Image: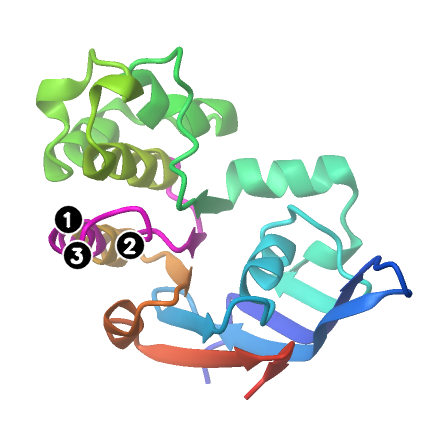
Amino acid sequence: MTTPLLTVTHIEKAYPGPDGPVPILRGVSLSLEAGRTLALTGESGSGKSTLLHLIGGLDVADAGTIMLGETEVTSLSDKGRAALRRDRVSVVFQQFNLIPSLTVAANIAFQARLSGSHDPDWTDRLSQRLGLTPHLSKYPEQLSGGQQQRVAIGRTLAARPALVLADEPTGNLDEATGRDVLDLLLELVAETDAALLCVTHSQSLADRMERRVHLQEGRIA
């Protein structure tokens, strides 16, 4: 049996409320192998984005463990979690999160340069596959929403992460553009043998993933 790249075990998370802690995740467990795709679905408030943020080291769990390979994410310091996001995990956000003062080319190369893994040939190939070669000298504000999300995908994959986390990656796009962007994301993730965990409300997007996990009130339904 293949050893999972990602193993989430009995994760719990609560946030402060006026009457005490409000539970968001209540003992969630899941796993994901390298090169595989997983959709995380559920209603608003079910804990999907919270779980994604915990896996990516953007927040800290109250209990349970998250393993990425041999690394226990849940025991890392702030510095260790930052290094994890720099070197092994990349996030595609709904809001793109591009750096407005950098060109498209610089945005795509940004994370790879930080991690010391910048490969100009791979970056050029990514730009071509994403249809961004004519736009490399432009700035994010000069691009459409679909083009900006392609830049975000390029930035994510330029560093060749082991795990790609996507939080509603087509949520700000029209249906046709979202479908095209998802096609490219799936093709390029497969090419790099990365694992993809995708948080989504979209039935059609979830159907494109190999597996689906549904969260309901902080538990696996």
Element class at badge 3: helix
Q: CA distance from mark 2 to mark 3?
A: 21 Å
| Secondary element at image label 2 | helix
Who's the residue at 28% across and 39% down the image? 149
Q: Are marks 1 and 3 in contact (CB under 8 Å)?
A: yes
Give the residue pinned by disc 2: 189
Which kind of residue does numbered mark 3 sit on?
Glu
- Dots 1, 2 in contact, CB < 8 A: no
Q: Which residue is mark 1?
A: 177
Q: How is the image coloured?
A: rainbow
Q: Is residue 20 left or right of residue 143?
A: right
Which residue occupies the extreme front position in the image? 18
Percent coordinates x, y for residue 46 in the rendering: 58, 72
Residue at the disc numbered 3: 175
* Mark 1, secondary structure of its residue: helix
Residue 212 visible in this rendered orientation of the protein: yes
Q: For the C terminus, give its image quadrant.
A: bottom right
In this view, 64 is above or below 74 = below
